[in-house]
Structures are given as C-alpha cells and as structure tokens.
Image: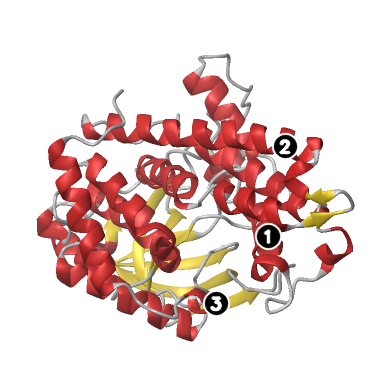
Amino acid sequence: MDFNDTPQEADFRAQARAWIAANRPTDWQNKTGRDVDGIAMSKAWQKKKYDAGWACIHWPQEYGGRGATPIERVIWSQEEGELGQLGGVFIIGQGMCAPTIMAHGSEAAKQRHVPKIASGEEIWCQLFSEPGSGSDLAGLRTRAEKQGDEWVINGQKIWTSGAHYADFGIVITRTDPTVPKHKGLTMFYLDMRSPGVTVKPIKQVSGRSDFNEVYFADVRIPDSQRLGAVGDGWKVSLTTLMNERLAVGGGFPTNFEEMFELTKVIEGEDGPAIEDQSVREKLADWYIRAAGLRNTQNRMMSALSRGQAPGPEASISKLVLGINRQNMASTMLDIQDTYGVISQKDLAVNGGQFHEIFFRAVAHRIEGGTDEILRNIIAERVLGLPGDIRVDKDLPFNNIPTGAN
C-alpha cells in the first residue's frame, strides 16, 4: 500500500487546504460542546461546507455529497484536522443514520432527509439500547403495532446520545414476539418532536448530559417511515451497527501528538515528564497503537474504495481506541501529580481536556458494542473461532425465560 499522494490526490489536498484556510471559523475552540452555542457554531460550519461541496464528500451527489473517493475522504479529514470536532453532533446522523436510510429507506426518504443531514440542518439520533437490552440488542421490548396505515410505538430506550437536541431518530422495535428474537424486529425513523415522545437527559460523571432516556407512549408514525421490510429490522440494524463501529472507531482522534507535546512541558521532580523512562515506554506503546489504528483505518478505506461494506474488522479500531484513550488520559492525569485533580478549564493543563477524555472513554468502551461484544465479533467473524453458546437463539421471543416468568 502506497501512502504517498498521487498527483490527483495532491491536487485535491491543495484544494481542500486552500478552502479551509479561507473559510475556517475563528474562536471555535470553546464552542465545540453540545450546548446551544456549540451546536449553532457546528451547524454554521457544516452548512458552509455543504454549500461549497465539502460536506459528506463520499456520499452520492444526488444526496448532498460530491461522490468523492474514500481516499479523498481521508485526505479531507486530515486537512480539516481539529475542526472536525465541530462535526461531533452530526456523527450519529452522518455516520450511522444516513447510511442506513441510503441502504434501506424509500427514495422519498432519501431525497427528503439525507441532504439535510449532510448540510447539518437535521441532527439525528439512534434509538437502540434499552434497560434490559444493550449488549443483547435483539432482546429489546419496545413494541410497534400496526393500526391501519400507521404504527403505534410504546416502550423505552436508554443511553440515547444527543436525543435532547436531535430532530429525528431511527428506532428499532419488536413487531412480532411469537418468532425468535432476531426475526421479529422492524426499524423505523421518526420525528423526535412527535406527540408521545419524552426525552430525559442522564447526568454523567463528567457533569455533562450527552445521553438520555427516551420514552414512547402511543407514538404514531406512518408506515412510510419504515426502514426495510417488516420483521427485517435485525438486518437493517446490522447496517447501522457496522457503520457505527466505523464512525465511532474512526471518529475520535488518538490524541497522541498533543499528549507527546505535553509530556515535554509538564514538569516532574526530575525534569520534564518525557525524560522519565516509564513515560517514554508508554509513549512508545501508544505511538505503535496510534500507527496501527491509522493503518487499520487506511485498510478499511481501501476496502470501501473497492465497493465493500464496513465489515467486522471495523470493531478492531473501536476496541483499541477506547482502551487506548482511557489509559492515555489516566497516565496524563497521573504525571501531573496533585495538579491532575484540577479539571477547571481555565486552570487545568490543556484546558482539562484529558479529564474529559478520561471520563468520556468509559462511554466510548460501551457505546456501539462493549469491549466484550467486540472481542466476540473479532473472535468469531474475523478469526473464525467457535461462537458462544446461545440457548435462546431459536426460541420464540415470548417464550424466552425472564426474571418475571
């Protein structure tokens, strides 16, 4: 694999670099959170990119992209650099929901929503996990019942990122409890402001509220908002999950470069932290993992450029990145000694960024599949090892024993 730019790629990189230099927002570093100001700044940057043809560039032109190659997508991402953080509120819509709609939605749904997701006009969320089904997603109990041309949804979701500011969401439901759990599911999308939808933010250890509980009480949606066939929701959800692991695994930076620079200036008892042998050994380990993640990403991009869908190997990046970010942030707090407890942005080293990474990494290791689930996927579907024993796989869902029966 040759990582040097071809002449065409070098020209593309120069165009991207010039446009970003001429149009980049100023004073954005303190507004990348998911508050009102941060979302407004993110939407403004996304719309400017969209109008100039630089948003979701790998998507088809008819849906708001520019039909760019996967390698051009990587080049754009490299050139956008830290400004890519402004896309955080769009990662679920653009990384998971839109690919699902493009794969399983009607043409009307694609034309209506995908360009608005690309432009940042619509923010989407993904309504999957439930109190009793997260790692075992197929065990979900939120029901959807057909009444005429509409479906009526009742139930609860949890850990729904961004539901409190999302405009729309994709939701997986149980439509037939009399068949095995993977066969009785159906996927829909809905307006998050529909009557009967209640969103309750969850307070996190970091002080933020990125996740939510979402309740559905007789929420009515038309059949035209179904994604895929009735009972085919598990297949549709796999499209979402494969893209989720690609988006989550590739959507977070490794932070190696800034960590490396900080170890040069953080002072310990015997001088800068980078002169400590134990810190140098960790830096070497993290550099190797960061390089491995880049190469894994490039390998996935190469596969996508050949027309392949995201495969189970996308789980590798999310698994390694989540563990790496948590270990790295923990060490960066340790080497600050007593100053490591200061998280106030205007006083902490690097604006308290490593505190935020440390606490956020816990969620990173759960969302989109826990470490244990990802290890199972890698073992079974990448390495070809025997699968776990699943005694409930072929039982009708309403016959699966629960704590209540």
Residue occupying image coordinates x 55% and y 49%: 257
Q: Which mark is residue 109?
A: none
Image quarter in which the N terminus is found:
top left
Amino acid type at mark 3: Val
- 189 sits to left or right of 364: left
Whichever of callouts 2 and 1 sits on the residue coming sooner in the sequence is 2
Rendering coords of residue 271 (x, y %): 82, 51
Looking at the rendering, which quadrant does residue 194 occupy?
bottom left
Amino acid type at mark 2: Arg
Q: CA distance from mark 2 to mark 1?
A: 18 Å
What colour-coding does the image apply? Answer: secondary structure
Residue occupying image coordinates x 50% and y 52%: 252
Looking at the rendering, which quadrant does residue 342 occupy?
bottom right
Residue occupying image coordinates x 28% and y 52%: 76
Whichever of callouts 2 and 3 sits on the residue coming sooner in the sequence is 3
Which residue lies under the disc numbered 1? 354
Q: Which dot, 1 or 3, sits closer to the camera?
A: 1
Rendering coords of residue 293 (x, y %): 49, 35
Q: Is residue 113 visible?
A: no
Q: Secondary structure under badge 1?
A: helix
180 shown above or below 109? above
Q: Secondary structure under badge 3?
A: strand
Which residue lies under the disc numbered 3? 199
Callout 2–callout 3 Cβ contact below 8 Å: no
Q: Which mark is residue 280?
A: 2
How many labels, in total? 3
Q: Is residue 287 visible?
A: yes
86 shown above or below 241? below
Q: Which dot, 2 or 3, sits closer to the camera?
A: 2
